Amino acid sequence: MDLLMEAMRGLGAMLLQVVAVLLLEELTFGGLVRLFVAPRPGIGNRGAQDDRCLSLRRKIRELKRKKGERTCSH
């Protein structure tokens, strides 16, 4: 029984360190990545405001329509 309790203490001590490091990493690097990668309003994409909401297939379909190519409609 004592061996089981010692094993649980050791496992808990290791897991606590791993969880603390992962939390610290997420708070620092995750926040930095969000800061640098996050789109800023008014900068970058010169398309229409609702252009980001369109799906990729719809964007391709609209581009083909502008070029005059035929598109398949399902």
Image (cartoon, rainbow, N blue to C red):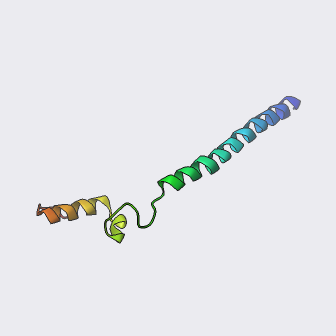
| Of residues 29 and 73, the one drawn nearer to the viewer in this rendering | 29
Residue 48 in the figure: left or right of residue 31: left
Asked if residue 74 shows in the view, the reply is: no
Asked if residue 59 shows in the view, the reply is: yes
Image quarter where the N terminus lies is: top right
Give the percent coordinates (x, y) of residue 45: 35, 62
Above or below for 32 versus 46: above
Give the percent coordinates (x, y) of residue 12: 77, 38
Image quarter where the C terminus lies is: bottom left
Q: Going by the picture, which residue comes out furthest to the right?
A: 2
* Residue at left offset 27%, top offset 59%: 57
Residue 74 in the figure: left or right of residue 42: left
Above or below for 29 versus 65: above
* Residue at left offset 26%, top offset 62%: 59
Q: Going by the picture, which residue comes out furthest to the bottom?
A: 49
* Residue at left offset 36%, top offset 70%: 49
Residue 3 in the figure: left or right of residue 70: right
Give the percent coordinates (x, y) of residue 40: 46, 62
| Of residues 55 and 41, the one drawn nearer to the viewer in this rendering | 41
Above or below for 29 versus 35: above
* Residue at left offset 11%, top offset 61%: 70
Give the percent coordinates (x, y) of residue 18: 69, 39
Splitting the image into 4 quarters, where does residue 73 fall? bottom left
| Of residues 21 and 72, the one drawn nearer to the viewer in this rendering | 21
Splitting the image into 4 quarters, where does residue 10 fall? top right
